[in-house]
Image (tube, rainbow, N blue to C red):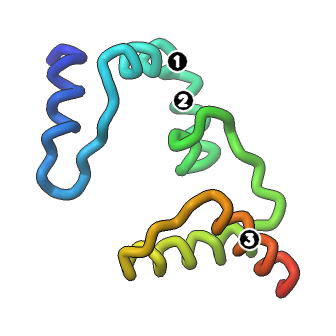
Amino acid sequence: MTQADVVDYFKNRVDGGALIFNQSTLSRKCKNQEQLEEQAKLNSSALSYKCPRIVTCPDVERALVLWVKHMEEKHETINGPMLREKRKLLRFSS
């Protein structure tokens, strides 16, 4: 299977798992495969970030994840300022 085939496969998934990326991004990620696999072992969500994140308040992180899932279930839009404000509120309440 070529890289272009992989890109097309993920772009056209109908089960709600469509991912949009291009062949050059896939090629770049393949070159860093060992590093990405190590990051994935350390943190299951590590591949979602360009730079690894360090979680300093795990309770706040878990609460934010639950809040985001709740907002997504309500089909609400979430943006950066909303997340930062929610994080402030959660940090002060814990």
The circle drawn on residue 36 is 2
Identify residue for label 1: 32
Left or right of 15: which side holds 25?
right
Q: Is residue 37 above or below residue 16?
A: above
Residue at 33 percent across and 30 percent down: it is: 21
Q: Which residue is drawn at 64% across and 68% down?
A: 82
Left or right, 62 with reference to 89: left
Of labels 3 and 1, earlier in sequence is 1
Q: Give the label on residue 85, or none.
A: 3
Quadrant where the image shows the N terminus: top left
Q: In which quarter of the image is residue 93?
A: bottom right
Type of amino acid at the residue the image marks with label 2 = Leu
Viewer-proximal residue among 18 and 39: 18
Looking at the image, is 50 positioned above or below residue 26? below
At a point 24% along the width and 46% down the height, the residue shown is 18
On residue 56, which mark appears? none
Q: Helix, strand, or loop for circle 2?
A: helix
